Image (tube, rainbow, N blue to C red):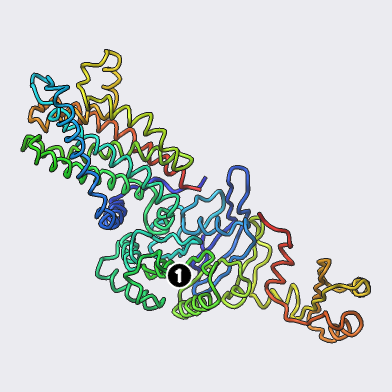
Amino acid sequence: MNRPAWALTWRCLRVWRRDWLVNRQSWKVGFLVPLLEPIFYVAAFGVGFRLLIPEVHYEGLTVSYVKFMAPSLVATSIMYNAFFENTYSSFVRMYYQKTYDAIMATPLSIEEVILGEILWGATKSVMAAIIVLAVLSVAGLIHYPSALAVIPLAFLGGLAFGSAGMVFTGIVKNIDTFNLPIFLFLTPMFLFSGTFFPTDTLPHWAQMAAQAVPLTHLVHLTRGLCFGIAGWRDVAVAVGYLLVFTALCLPLALAAMRRRLTR
Amino acid sequence: MSSNADDCVLEARHLRKLYGKAVAVDDVTFRVERGELFGLLGPNGAGKTSTIRMAYGSSPLSGGSLRVFGRDIVTDWRAIRMRLGVCHQDNNLDTEMSVRENLEVFAGFFGIPRAVARERADKLLTFFELEHRGESEVHELSGGMMRRLVLARAMVNEPEFLILDEPTTGLDPQSRHQVWERLGRLKQDGVSILLTTHYMEEAARLCDRLIIVDQGRILVEGRPRDLVAQYVGNQVVESSPVCPELRDFVKQRGLEHEDLGHRMLIYCKDDESLFREIARRYCQDNCILRMGTLEDVFLKLTGRDLRE
């Protein structure tokens, strides 16, 4: 077959720009989710759980439950924003709006379109992380300046989860099929990745399983940075894991989308 | 080798497209000359859209070669697309942006600076009579306006060559005439155009040359008037209903005709006396003489079976 080679250049930023411009409209309502969600969680866990779980022991610290849980809200919002952007939203643009078809008549390759979309997903993670951090900071739950490092971390986490989402966008039959990866991967990660309780309370096999998934590493480092206790080793492990995860998922996503869009 | 790249905007040679084992485009060879409006006609599933998708490098070739502006689409797709405009069959506009933003953001995909993009958008909105709708949302536009916006968007990079996939499908006659008028003006400005359409009247009116394809193969190529003259003649007698005596007459005289049961078309080239004879003897009131059309040619060549 006579097909063009992969082509990946900085031109992907043009697709990112398109998404950014569109987002200025939808963000007028969209920002409410990362703004209100942490408020609800802090209210529910801070008020509701205060008497049930007075404090948590974590890495030699003793903290209130709400303080323990708060950084997880940042980490999970990083995960959900990129994943949803590069599944549901990307699918709508690809399948219903045929935006990609239109762009592919311009000097952009499929790979550039898809990478632009993934970069945009990561950008949404960053925006969400900043808002969640701001809300939690008002509640006095975040330690600065180390927490500022969560912002670049959000971008990396967004790349990881966005690439994973885009792999599914490349293979799902229809938009309802996204329920499956969300139910099978995202929800278990949301519950068991050291988000709402430390992983060392889990049985050994479950701890091993937790170490294998990306959210555990993202939560661990986010918490370390929000508490101001992250060491270089924590940074190296989590960043290393997310880089490798992205390096695996991104080419898979590009290949799956290329396969899907090349007819 | 492309022969004289300056005169030819598109050259397809022995083009093939396979989807698994199904053959969509089968050994298609044609050229679009510079400044020409070239028609690509055919029933649904004939391979028109597959051909077009290969022409702008969105679909890989299964065989043959395709050159645009004298350059190979497989290796030089990016340079080619810089100078090319494509109007898709679907209104694949960005529904989340305003009319003007649709043009300006699309210009961004070509790397056109923002100030230039704004000027182009102004010019195109005026050209397509959308200047008062610049700030409208896409979903507020009528079908005709959306179509014009898709066309305008295809021209944001000031292309030398436009590929239009059914640009008037679904439009009312007013909108269609407006699009035709614009295409005529573009042609005058020297833009080359490759057009697909299901409207034979449109093809006959606009195209300098055209090909009719069916099941992936080219059936004929030529100027619309020449094709009509060659395949059906300038005059067609249409009789409905058909009396048995007329059937016998047609057979006996060996006239070229098409018998549709309740209706019969007799292609009588330029012989008007034949019509008078038929009308007098067989079908005084239910018989008309009309001009042969490209639609006659199309149906004669591709048959009347439905394509689904």
Q: Position of residue A37 (x, y in %)?
A: 22, 40
Q: Chain of mark 1?
A: B
| SS at mark 1 in the image | loop
Pointer 1: what residue?
B142
- Left of A82 or right of it: where is B154? right
For image coordinates 44% across by 52% down, the residue present is A96
Seen from the viewer's position, the closer of residues A145 and B87 is: A145
Residue name at image x 69 percent, y 68 percent: B298
Mark 1 Cα-neighbour bin, 10 Å: few <14, some 14–19, many ≥20: few
Q: How many numbered marks have been drawn onto this rendered protein structure? A: 1
Name the quadrant containing residue B221: bottom right
Residue type, numbered disc 1: Ser
Q: Position of residue B155 (x, y in %)?
A: 40, 69
In percent of width and height, residue B167 lies at: 51, 68
Relative depth, front residue between A11 and B141: B141
Res A188 quadrant in image: top left
Q: Residue at x 50, y 59 (%)?
A: B55
Q: Is residue B91 left or right of residue B218?
A: left
Give residue A107's position: percent from left, percent from top.
37, 57
B64 relative to A61, above or below: below
In this rendered view, identify the residue nearer to me: B29 or B150.
B150
To which quarter of the image does residue B151 belong?
bottom left
On screen, residue B115 above or below A98: below
